[in-house]
Image: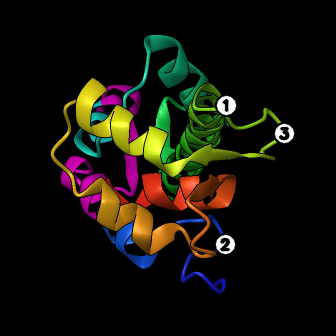
Amino acid sequence: LTMSGEDADGLTKEEEAKCWEAFSAFDKDSSGEIDANELRIVLEMMGQKTTEEEIFRMIAEADAENTGLIKYEQFKKVIADQKKTQSLTNEEDTLDAFVSLGGLPNGEGSIDAKKLIQIIKYDFEMTIDIEKLIEDIDEDGSGEIEYDEFRNLLSSSD
């Protein structure tokens, strides 16, 4: 287990439990293996949006012996890889948003808190208490949101 409570795959105990639950639900004969179609259904059940191509790639990677079946350990690795891919994509999206609000592409610079409040409340018409969120994350009280503060803001709201 790592410091953040994740196992070696990068999954939390909760995610690991969900993995096992989903895998077991489709492993009807308790053989410890599921097939490609079942993998797709399990991924969808777990909220993983995947294209045909991605499913095919995952199966190719997970099913090294070309049996058409995927064992639990292989399945768990697929889920962990998906999680990493999605967090990388999220990181890119976060940086893009930061830059579009006035930050720099290298993560330097900052966003004006007033500008962010304006956009959230009036442009996006969101009803979240953005002032409170900003107050909580603007650690140095500067009224400027640095990249790490911005990232924390986004992760606190989902």
Query: What are the residue bounds of the magenta stretch?
Result: 19-40
SS assignment at label 3: loop
State the quadrant of the N terminus: bottom right
Q: CA distance from mark 2 to mark 3?
A: 30 Å
Q: Are marks 1 and 3 in contact (CB under 8 Å)?
A: no
- Locate residue 156: give its quadrant: bottom left
Mark 3 surroundings: few (<14), some (14-19) or many (≥20) residues within 10 A = few
Q: Is residue 145 above or below residue 120?
A: below
Label 1, label 3: how many angstroms apart (C-alpha)?
A: 9 Å
Q: Which residue is mark 2?
A: 8
Q: Position of residue 122 (x, y in %)?
A: 25, 30
Relative to 22, does residue 59 appear above or below in the rendering? above
Kindly identify which residue carries mark 3.
Answer: 106
Decide if residue 20 is in sight here. no
- x 26%, y 54%: residue: 22
Which residue bears the numbered disc 1?
Answer: 99
Give whichever of 140, 68 is nearer the camera: 140
**Which residue type carries mark 1?**
Val
Label pair 1/2, CB-CB below 8 angstroms: no
The answer to which of marks 1 and 3 sits earlier in the sequence is 1
Residue at 19%, 31% (x, y): give it: 125
Residue sitting at x 53%, y 21%: 54
How far apart marks 1 and 2 lie (CA) works out to 33 Å
Residue 111 x/y as whole percent:
61, 44
Q: Label 1's element? A: helix
x and y percentages locating residue 97 in the rendered image: 56, 32
Left or right of 102, for residue 78: left
Instruction: Say which of 48 and 70 sits in front.
Output: 48
**Label 2 vs label 3, nearer the camera:** 3
* Residue 104 place in picture, x, y as percent: 78, 35
Between 153 and 90, which is closer to the camera in this rendering?
153
**Which tag, 1 or 2, sits closer to the chain's start?**
2
